[in-house]
Amino acid sequence: MKKINLLIVPVALLAAGWFWSPAVQVEGLRTCRLHEPSNIVKPVFSWQMKSSRAGASQKAYAITLRTADGNEVWNSGTIETGDSHAATYSGPALDSATKYRWTVKVTDEKGRTYTAKPATFITGLIRADDWNGSDWIAVPGCEIITSNNVPKTHFAAPGTSCFFKKIANGKTVKEAYWTVTGQGAFQAYVNGKPLPDVLKPGFTHVFKTRHSFTYDITDMLDKGADGVNVFSAMVSAGWWRDKIVHYRGKESAFRAQLIMRYADGSKARFGTDASWSGAVAGPVKAAGIFDGETYDARVKTPWMMTGVDTAFKPVKTINEFRGVIVPMEGAPIGLREDLRLAPKETYVWSGVEGAGEDAYGKVKVLRRYEPNATVKLAAGETLVVDFGQNAAAVPEFTFSAAAGTELSVKPAEMLNDENGLKKRGNDGPEGSVYRRNLRKLQEHGAEVKYTFAGNGEESYRPEFTFFGYRYISVTASGDVVFKAIASVPVTSIPKWSECGSIETDVADVNRLVLNVLWGQYSNYLSVPTDCPQRDERLGWTADTQVFCAAASRSADVYGFLYKFMRDMRDSQHDNGSFTGVAPTAQYGDLAEQLGWADAGIIIPYTMWQRYGDLSIVADNFESMEKYMALTAKNRFNSPVANGHQWADWLSYENYESAGGGANPNQIPAYETGADGKRAPRKEALDYWHYLGGCYLLWDAQMMAAMSEALGKTEAATKYRAIVKDTVAYLKSDFFEKDGMIKQCFRDMQTPALFALKFGLVEGAAADKTRAGLLKNIADHGGCLQTGFLGTSIIMDTLTYDAVSPETAYTLMLQRKNPSWLYSVEQGATTIWERWNSYTKADGFGRAGMNSFNHYAYGAVLDWMYGTMAGIRLDPKSPGWKHFILAPIPDKRIGNVNATYESPYGAIKSSWEFNKNGTWHFRAEIPANTSATVILPNGETREQASGKFTWSGKIGS
């Protein structure tokens, strides 16, 4: 490693005068890390102290909770602590479906007090008996149909279950709260107006959990004593009886509980029951998460406003769901209007030229349109729109056509290219949309079908589905005029949750940051999906664990992953193993998959470290202990591991399980024996057991720390013993007498990374392992060779364990395959599933598993914040109360400018090299925190809050 010398030139740090203002504000109030949330059960409070005064800190706080009317419910009293996060409510039981206001008074280090503006939250239905008087209601015709011709074949009957009921107030209404849930993706309406959020209730385990949503609907009502209001809902197949859950649910259904509180102080409940009316009706003729939506605009819904329709009949009550209804945890799914995408390129084509036996040819473009222009489409023509950004989204149109005109919209991630050459993997002529990677949805699914009402200008956006796409291909049975076209992102990452930004002077690095962010928008959608486009969209647990630290840099994901841990518990096997996907749905239910099952430990630990809130640890501790009891026994020689492991998925190295690389010399994990049977190679089994042991070691280390934090000293002792035993096992079974790893692993990057990360090599063996790793990277042209698991640790391990940050920078700036910037140079706008999903030279990769929106390799973002910007967590201080500020510059990047909104406030770090090579560093440490600042020459200093600047020369 190059020796770095730094000449420090302090720039004035002024503690008084114009540079500093003594003002203190208390802001950023959150409940359960959510902004003004609903559906709260157990409030946990956090806030930020903001001040430009150096060293400003909190000495104590006092929280006051009141009803919306101002009546005090709870006062915490003065709590002597500097912590401003994870303050738990300990007052009397809260009422369900009720709005509360809370504030916090902070005492600073000088004894002065400051009170925050109040924040609000709304409780969900907290107790099981809150649902008394409410039934699941359904209508005949929206269930699963079994084909008479094909055994074990199911499909969702078309149609949408629609319900309504008129409810008379009887008295003047003071406030009203409506709690809704569904068996199927649904929307609920009050007097014809939809409730917030989309695709409710989201993806959960079909048999174990349904989420409910409580809304303050007071302002949506006619509140007079003589008022009559209409409550309605439409429920589709999604999340319940469609392909994404393998048709596990049988009937679409709706359940709701309305609580009205009157001006005279009384209240009443109105639950869904047999008095509601229902029918298979409405304009949504069919809808599914995978399939898309079929919409007939000629069908109107006056019953939403009038509460009258003779075609509707009394509903039936059902009892199909036997699990628990849980108030929504984390942010619900929403539309990001602020991220709305306009067309970047629009053209209409008809006909093909240049087609032949080896090529599909090229489309004949008839017309090209400027952005925001009125677009015309005729029968027999195809409209292609490029929104410039791959995203999980829904298209939106303002358009017109004659009544009965049928429109088809097919989304896609890529366009066919190079005259549609078939050897490049194209599925159509150049300029047409490429959909082969959608697998079964290529021809049948992932489509919007719209029938025009013909009453002039119409507006439409699908309500019960979403797609992963950058392009859309549109055809119609007659002339259509488009006044406006847009793509609206769908995500569980709301704008208020975003917390990070990082920018450099290297354009492609900045594009990489955006690619990671858009991958997170797209795949943090109810569950952390692997991809948003094909017939999968599952919560793969390894993808989640390798990315969760990086995810926390871009957005506050505590609530989102708290919810996902319920999905993991719901899917956990009886023997304690966590599954490959959660919630279990189509496939991926395999047990004891190293790196996948371990997500059940890694996610709670990471969320505790990043946010300082132990709730996620405490609420999952029993399930984690159950898993550890299994894995501590089986990881040493698991019969499950002997059968199959995904391991370092899609790596370019030996013993990869999916043939993920482009290395012709790659030795696969499996071989075919003399008996013709396919089985793992002995070396692959050894590799799996080695990686499994490394994850067990990591799990036990994390469990020891979490046990200690919870005050469970016996458990902590137990896990420290497992750490010791596992280290002994690994060294005994996978390392030679000289301390080096087994010979068959020495030409691989991932085994060396794990050995260095966990200190399994020492002394001369450690030096040789570092040297061997760096040589391996150099021999591969400065490229990594790792898959999902190895990539998640490679950058930090190279920087801090192999002591070669310059090699880490080389990997990040690499443009050859495989690398992060390789996909950027190929035109990527999100992270890809494979390093080489598409190349300009050779075309498309294998279509069966080739997503262009897969976030796992975006794990590099955590290193970018932690090393480039130097904003690093102190593991001894979960939640960023104290942190490390230690940027490691590299002259191949001229400047870095980063902000991370920690639970305590914005941490800012920026640096640049000027023309004479001087390095300038500026940092801002938020109030009520402190940092250990480590400069590139190794000088360390402790700093309280404030703004600081250093300059120095870097030389050899």
Image (spheres, rainbow, N blue to C red):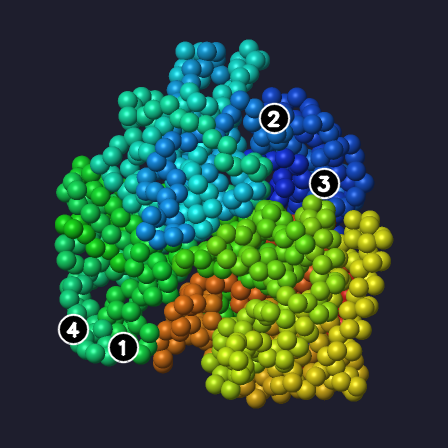
Residue at left offset 29%, top offset 59%: 443
Q: Quadrant of residue 824?
A: bottom left
Q: Which residue is mark 1?
A: 421
Q: Position of residue 749 (x, y in %)?
A: 62, 80
Q: Mark 3 or mark 4: which comes first in sequence? A: 3
Residue type (three-letter) at the residue carrying disc 3: Ala
Q: Mark 2 or mark 1: which comes first in sequence? A: 2
Q: Is 897 situated left or right of 301 in this image?
A: right
Q: Is 146 situated left or right of 385 in this image?
A: right
> Mark number for residue 353?
4
Q: Residues within 10 Å of mark 2 (few under 14, many from 20)?
A: few
> Mark number for residue 87?
3
Between 362 and 739, the one lying in front of the other is 739
How far apart, in angstroms, are the residues tagged by discs 4 and 2? 68 Å
Residue at left offset 20%, top offset 47%: 406
Q: Position of residue 396 (x, y in %)?
A: 31, 48
